[in-house]
Amino acid sequence: MEIKAGLVAIAVHPPPGPNRPNFFTEMVQFYRQLLQQDPEPYQVDRYAEFQLPGLWIALFPPKPSQQLEFGQASNSPISLCLKITDLAEAIAQLKTWDCPMGEVAIASHGQEVYAYDPQGNRIILYQPNSSRGMANHR
């Protein structure tokens, strides 16, 4: 089997509590800023796709019949890992968005920080420091 590219599909659920009718738009805006690009294709309140080299990230609101299948994102075992060139710059940018994040950690592949999108999905930003593991994955 030869895999050419991947797609990460994120089911967007409005958070519990106060009504946030524009939550899908909030999520699209978060990823627009994070990935520094506009979604294409983009269907307001229905679908947004961001294209990175070898990886697409799609946001969609599940249909009412799919709510149980997709569940809530809290404590999700899945992480979106993004290799970056300057972790300090990325952290500074995330702080301007009031993005929740943890402390910088030293891992076998370099430095990393866990950040969370408005829905609570984990995003691991890492800056490689060696030729091991995912650090040199292109």
Image (spheres, rainbow, N blue to C red):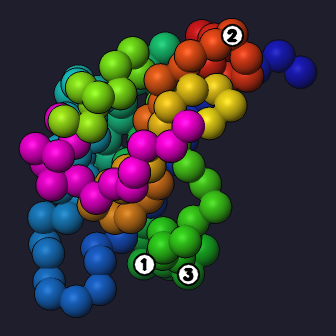
> In the image, 92: left or right of 82?
left
Which residue is at the front of the view, 134 or 105?
105
Q: Is residue 20 left or right of residue 136?
A: left
Most extreme residue toward the front, as rendered? 106
Where residue 19 sits, quadrant-wise, is bottom left
Would residue 8 appear left or right of 114 to someone viewing this image? right
Residue placed farthest to the right in the image?
A: 1
User: Is residue 33 covered in magenta?
Assistant: no
Q: Which residues are magenta?
A: 93-106
Looking at the image, tell me whether mark 3 or mark 2 is earlier in sequence order.
Answer: 3
Helix, strand or loop at mark 3:
helix
What is the x, y in percent for residue 21? Answer: 13, 72
Give the residue type that dot 2 points to. Answer: Ser
- Amino acid at pointer 1: Pro
Image quadrant holding the N terminus, namely: top right
Q: Is residue 96 magenta?
A: yes
Q: Dot 2 corresponds to which residue?
A: 131
Compute the Cα span from label 3 to label 2.
41 Å
Residue at 18% across / 35% down in the picture?
93
Q: Are marks 3 and 2 in contact (CB under 8 Å)?
A: no
Circle number at residue 68: 3
Mark 3: amino acid? Leu
Mark 3 surroundings within 10 Å by alpha-carbon count, few (fewer than 14), some (14 through 19), many (20 or more) = few
**Between marks 1 and 3 in the image, the one whose residue lies nearer the viewer:** 3
